[in-house]
Image (tube, grey):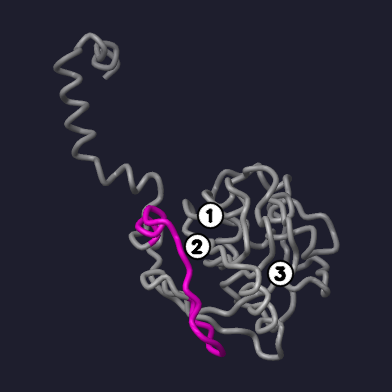
Amino acid sequence: MQPFTAFTGHILPLDRANVDTDAIIPKQFLKSIHRTGFGPYLFDEWRYLDRGEPGQDCSQRPINSDFVLNWPRYAGATILLTRHNFGCGSSREHAPWALADYGFRVLLAPSFADIFFQNAFKNGLLPIRLDEQTIADLFIQAQADTPLLMRVDLEAMQLEPVSSAPIPFTIDPFHRHCLLNGLDDIGLTLQHVDEISAYEQRRRLETPWLFNDLVAAN
């Protein structure tokens, strides 16, 4: 997983509450278990005028010009600004996969669904909870004539909009450590590979009968 320290990006304002995971990535795309390739289908039912299918060439599909993700001014945005309870619904991990594959790295909202919140961290996204007034102020700035550029500093735990004062945020130490060091669940486990190997060797000596079938198979 790519370490997250600080970066600068534009904000895309998605002015909707209770966005569920089926809206983020519809159910027909869950057939794939690869983490990549979901970006073109992010918010598929809102983004296009037809029904999307896995493997479809989205460059030829009719787009919904009223949906904010299709507005040229927000092309290349890497920070998603949204409303309450983002990521509700089913617990599909494909939702953060799709957001990350599209290019988003930071999510700003007053609240997130709990399972989605945890899945976001495990897939390199930084979901940040901010109070409603701060979110409302950011929407005003992001919807102005010039897209809002913001620096996100995880080490300092601070958002730095180019047109306003810095905004502090909080994040628990464990998630902060994992993102700063690029550690997902597998990466965390591999930090203890020596202890794991030592335990396996000790178990072979203490209980050799448990490994007889493995020896015969090899």
Front-most of 146 and 44?
146
Give the CA distance from mark 3 to mark 1: 17 Å
Front-most of 167 and 86?
167
Give the CA distance from mark 2 to mark 3: 17 Å
The disc, 1 or 2, on the residue closer to the chain's N-terminal end is 1
Residue beneath label 2, please? 126
Q: Could you tell me which residue is drawn at 57 percent across and 72 percent down?
A: 79
List x then y, in percent, for residue 69.
Answer: 71, 71
Of the residues shown, which amino acid type is indicated by label 2? Leu
Does 173 lie within the magenta span? yes
Residue beneath label 3, please? 14
Q: Magenta region: which residues?
A: 159-179
Give the CA distance from mark 1 to mark 2: 7 Å
Residue 31 in the figure: left or right of residue 106: right
List x then y, in percent, for residue 28.
Answer: 73, 45
Q: Could you tell me which residue is drawn at 57 percent across and 54 percent down?
A: 97
SS at mark 2? strand
Q: Could you tell me which residue is drawn at 65 percent across and 79 percent down?
A: 137
Q: Could you tell me which residue is drawn at 73 percent across and 64 percent down?
A: 58
Report crowding for label 1: few under 14, some 14 to 19, many 20 or more residues within 10 A (C-alpha). Answer: many
List x then y, in percent, for residue 76.
Answer: 60, 77
Vertical position of residue 26 compared to residue 13: above or below: above
Report crowding for label 2: few under 14, some 14 to 19, many 20 or more residues within 10 A (C-alpha). Answer: many
Is label 2 in contact with label 3 (beta carbons under 8 Å)?
no
Residue beneath label 1, please? 120
Residue 184 in the figure: left or right of residue 138: left
SS at mark 1? helix
Vertical position of residue 162 compared to residue 27: above or below: below
Can you say which quadrant of the picture contains the N terminus?
Answer: bottom left
List x then y, in percent, for residue 211.
Answer: 25, 15
Is label 1 in contact with label 2 (beta carbons under 8 Å)?
yes
SS at mark 3? loop
